[in-house]
């Protein structure tokens, strides 16, 4: 254990950062364990939490040995938010986010001698591999009836919905703020600015909705064609499909006997077999296919919610008051949307929120000035 006089200020600051990070890790895995319905995965998250407790205690001992009090063990906003999302929407929504955070942290202890001596780098890489397996659906379960359920729940794509929602709101907010400020700079009158903003809101929202509908529908049609081919193969060559599925499970770590047994049991039910083969070979399940109408409606609403913020002040007033109101409402929205991206990046909410706010307001100020120049040039 390090003596007080041998610990530099830089080392002490590093110990405190590590302690805070491990406090987050303990709380995150504890919350995931509480939210998880699968007993096997609940146990897995519990073991990960226990590993993080050991890591936390290592840094706590280092700090106390240096003669300093421990920092307050308070989980970060990001961890509390991820726990809230896991409780309400399931761990499958946040598992891909946690995987990205774990991957980003795999090398955090490689150059820290105290951590290397305690084996922490290996633990961090192990945690990252666990979440890679969960995201890819490679959780082992000896019961063949559980394979499709577990593998379907933890697909990486499921966790992208939250990110897409945040970006959809941010797109509507940023593009409409820039439009409104550009038109307001020319000073054509309140009605004209409001009409321009409302038109931009509707144009952007409908464009997003149509694009999403076409994208999802095209993906569904392509998947349906592949599914028909797979269905024909199950009917015509069932033994070949058993062998193919067994090979897949062998590649995931099953023994030859376990793989064949699981494959044969799955193939006893044609619908279960089709669903499982679709997951393994095509990377999707029929249950994973989104409705194009739901996707289009969601895209429309998300864009419109963001776009409404800079337009709203022009509904009730005009001139400098409306300009200030647009900047205020949009600024709050920009900061919150940027802060929400910290869930995926692992960066500070003040950094991500402030960066998004700064960029949005800078671009809107530029278009406001450009609009003023154009308005003066054409005599508005």
Image: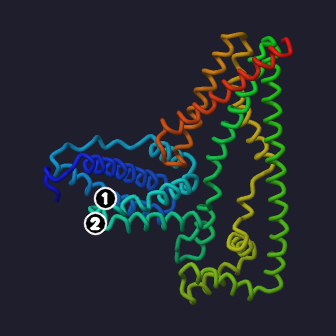
Q: Looking at the picture, how far across and down is residue 276, in whole percent?
A: 69, 72
Q: Which of 231 and 72 is in front in this view?
A: 72
Residue under the point 86% across and 15% down:
378
User: Does residue 317 appear left or right of residue 10 in this picture?
Assistant: right
Q: Residue 347 carries which label?
A: none
Element type at marker 1?
Answer: helix
Tell me the crowding category of disc 1: few under 14, some 14 to 19, or many 20 or more residues within 10 angstroms, Cα based: many
Q: Which of 97 and 87 is in front in this view?
A: 97
Of labels 2 and 1, the one closer to you: 2
Contact? badges 2 and 1 (CB < 8 Å):
yes
Q: In this view, does 294 lie above or below 33?
A: above
Residue 47 sits in which quadrant?
A: bottom left
The residue to which callout 2 is attached is 118
State the count of labels.
2
Q: Quadrant of the C terminus?
A: top right
Q: Residue 55 carries which label?
A: 1
Element type at marker 2?
Answer: loop
Find the distance from the CA under tag 2 to the CA under tag 1.
9 Å
Q: Looking at the picture, how far across and down is residue 219, in whole percent?
A: 80, 59
Q: Which of 362 and 107 is in front in this view?
A: 362
Q: Nearer the viewer, residue 231 or 329?
A: 329
């Amino acid at each position: 254990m390090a003596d007080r006089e041998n610990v530099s200020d830089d080392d002490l600051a590093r110990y405190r950062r590590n302690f805070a990070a491990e406090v987050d890790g303990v709380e995150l895995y504890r919350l995931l364990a509480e939210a998880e319905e699968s007993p096997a995965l609940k146990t897995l998250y519990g073991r990960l939490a226990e590993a993080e407790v050991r890591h936390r205690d290592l840094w706590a001992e280092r700090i106390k040995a240096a003669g300093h009090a421990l920092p307050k063990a308070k989980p970060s906003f990001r961890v509390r938010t991820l726990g809230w999302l896991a409780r309400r929407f399931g761990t499958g929504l946040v598992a891909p986010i946690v995987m990205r955070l774990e991957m980003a942290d795999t090398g955090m202890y490689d150059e820290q001698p105290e951590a290397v001596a305690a084996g922490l780098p290996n633990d961090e890489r192990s945690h990252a591999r666990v979440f890679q397996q969960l995201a890819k659906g490679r959780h082992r379960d000896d019961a063949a009836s559980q394979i499709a359920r577990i593998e379907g729940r933890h697909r990486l794509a499921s966790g992208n919905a939250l990110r897409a929602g945040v970006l959809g709101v941010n797109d509507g907010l940023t593009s409409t703020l820039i439009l409104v400020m550009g038109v307001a700079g020319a000073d054509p009158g309140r009605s004209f600015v409001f009409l321009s903003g409302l038109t931009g809101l509707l144009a952007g929202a409908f464009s997003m909705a149509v694009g999403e509908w076409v994208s999802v529908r095209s993906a569904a049609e392509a998947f349906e064609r592949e599914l028909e081919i797979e269905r024909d193969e199950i009917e015509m060559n069932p033994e070949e499909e058993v062998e193919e599925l067994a090979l897949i499970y062998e590649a995931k770590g099953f023994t030859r006997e376990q793989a064949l047994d699981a494959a044969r049991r799955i193939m006893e039910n044609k619908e279960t077999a089709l669903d499982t083969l679709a997951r393994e070979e095509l990377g999707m399940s029929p249950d994973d296919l989104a409705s194009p109408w739901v996707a289009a409606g969601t895209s429309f609403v998300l864009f419109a919610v963001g776009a409404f913020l800079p337009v709203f002040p022009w509904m009730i007033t005009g001139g400098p008051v409306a300009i200030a109101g647009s900047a205020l409402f949009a600024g709050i929205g920009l900061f919150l949307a940027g802060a929400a991206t910290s869930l995926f990046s692992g960066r500070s909410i003040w950094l991500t929120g402030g960066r998004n706010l700064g960029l949005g307001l800078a671009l809107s100020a530029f278009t406001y000035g450009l609009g003023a120049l154009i308005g003066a040039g054409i005599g508005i």
